[in-house]
Amino acid sequence: MPINHDGIWPEVRPTAEGRTHSVQFSPDGRYLISGHSGDRERVWDLASRTPLFEWTDTHEPVFGLEPATVIDLEYLPLGGTLLHSTDLRTGHTRTREWPYEDGWPVSGVEGRLEFLVTTSDGDKAIVDAGTGVVRCVLSGATDEVGRSVASRDGRLLATPSYKLKNDPIPIWNAEDGTRRGVIPFGGRSSTVVFLPGARCVIAGDGTTRVWDFATEAVVTELDGDEIALSADGTRLAVTDEEADVVIYSTDTWEPLVTLEDTGSAYAMAFSPDGSHVATGHDDDSIIRMWDSYSGRPAYDLSGVTREVHALAFSTDGQRLTTVTDDEVRIWDIGGERPAHRLPAPGGAVHTVAYSPDGSLLAVADDETVRFWDSTTASPAGALEPTGSPVLALAFAPSGGMLATACEDGTVHLWDAGREHVGVLDGLGRPAWYAAFHLDGRHLVVADDDTVCLWDTGTGKLVLHLADIEDRVDAVAIAPDGRGFAIATDSSDRLSVYRAAGTEPATPYTDTVSSLAYSPGGALAVGSDENTVHILKDPGSGDWNGFLDGHTGLVRSLAYSPDGRLLAAGCDNGVVHLWDTESERRLALLMALDDGGSAIVRAGGQRIVDGSPNGEFHFWGVR
């Protein structure tokens, strides 16, 4: 459940990135819960249209029967389950032990909140969420029963299988647990809702079917399989093949209105009064509200897209530079002032790098590399533009050479006097990664398809570090100069090599967006989750640590030179600063809308230079 209920860490405005897989209104229509990729759940205040919470690693939170409460189960790593009840008005959470090993909310019942659970005897039972008392045991239910939907009067229960795709759907008498019948199709991918008049709707595999219990037959079929039923049961919203949402009358099954240009609606829900339909989509985290009668857009519940796409520590570890929405800020890690803010005349900052002696900060501002005094943040010159945006920077360990990798596929070499001394040509694709080898002569360069080693002395390609079949998303070179890690896109695979030509370990099979080696050789992995994974011995492929609770999807990573700090930049403009030894979060660094900055340290200390304007807030604890 939420990590911020002690009031120490703020709730931060969420990101608009990722996808949305669920939406649900509170019974009074004042709040909405939306579920997103990265195991994130958000609670929205619909009156102000602002987010109240973003929680991670929750288990299908649902609204409780008490006003403005959310119920959630937490499974403990060493066994046992806790039930949390959160008051949305105060942020206060009450917690008690849950006497079952699991619990799935029973949707559709009016007047009570219930869970489908597995008892200590292995039975499937319906229990009261408030007391845990068993109301009925489903006679003969199998282990495949994992979800349940009740009729509005609570008398019937459908339990689609969560394992078997084409398994029939049992129908139960929810009063005594006896089996009433079966719908002969459905299964793992199906959604079920009960209609008035002894009917129900089963949606799955691209089709929505209406089942009549009296005739035991399908009476209507509709295109699409994402559905939502109005509270009075008179209207059904269905996403059709064109990705539009069509609202049908459940009496005549004639279309009443179409919500056009909804995009790829992946989740839907009617408001309790039926006036609006909320849609969530598989290509962003924005919740769109629609007038359910006219079909016109009403308003959006939107996060922020403010990706922290580049990070760099100074050589003494006392300053951290971040790039967020083409804003460059220098943060004083131990000081009392939030940050320097550097201008970006080119308007498209891609990356930053400190010189090895720590005196200069190089900023790739579109086609120009500008230098700044790292202590005073005063201008210190620039390189001559080469005619293409600079995507990556790399200083040689001695400081005697700087490499600038460009969008046109060229890598330009500059000496300590900022004179152009050479070019590496022949990639043919944008070069977005560059890192010098320890010897200061060889340079690793990556584009979307290749990761190669170049000799800066001869300007020749030396070798391809690995055979890559998919698009390259992230690269990192180990501090020993031999090992490296490559994350690829379509196969969602992280490959960790001890050296070129060796068989890689593949410890992770999900989208990886950022990689960073510590000075000691540990590998940090950021992905489309809110967790940073740590491999202390990357070549082994064994995970050793997890840093949880990021406020957005992790997009950039950087270790301090001594390896004691790890900075994780998220796609909502927040940087999390971690102590790597204790795995404890030390601070949040935030760039504010008004150009100001905010630092929030462990214990709740806040240093704010600007007006947050709702970008973050603290909840008091009662």
Image (cartoon, rainbow, N blue to C red):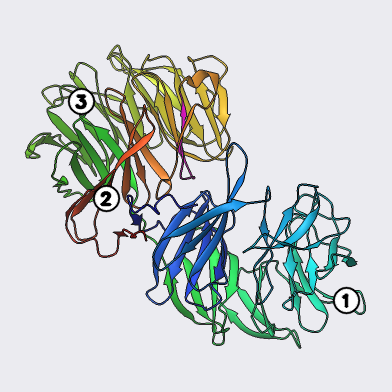
Quarter holding the C terminus? bottom left
Of helix, strand and loop, which one carries label 1? loop
Q: Which tag is nearer the camera, tag 3 or tag 1? A: 1
Crowding at mark 1 (Cα within 10 Å: few <14, some 14-19, many 20+)? some
Q: Earlier in the sequence, mark 2 or mark 1?
A: 1
Horizontal relation, residue 222 to residue 45: left or right: right
Q: Residue at label 2? A: 590
Of helix, strand and loop, which one carries label 2? strand
Measured as percent of width and height from the top left, residue 354 is found at 20, 29
Q: Please, what is the dominant secondary structure of the magenta stretch?
A: strand
Q: Which mark is residue 315?
A: 3
Instruction: Please tell me whether residue 54 is drawn above or below residue 108 in the rendered image.
Output: above
Measured as percent of width and height from the top left, residue 223 is found at 73, 71
Looking at this view, name the residue that lies furthest to the top: 439
* 580 or 343, nearer to the observer: 580
Measured as percent of width and height from the top left, residue 224 is found at 70, 68
Q: Which amino acid type is shown beneath numbered disc 2?
A: Met
Q: Which amino acid type is shown beneath numbered disc 1?
A: Phe
Could you give the CA–CA distance between mark 3 and mark 1, rounded to whole angstroms? 72 Å
Q: Which tag is nearer the camera, tag 3 or tag 2? A: 2
**What is the span of residues highlighted in magenta in the rendered image?**
526-535
Measured as percent of width and height from the top left, residue 11 is found at 36, 56
For image coordinates 87% across by 59% down, the residue present is 139
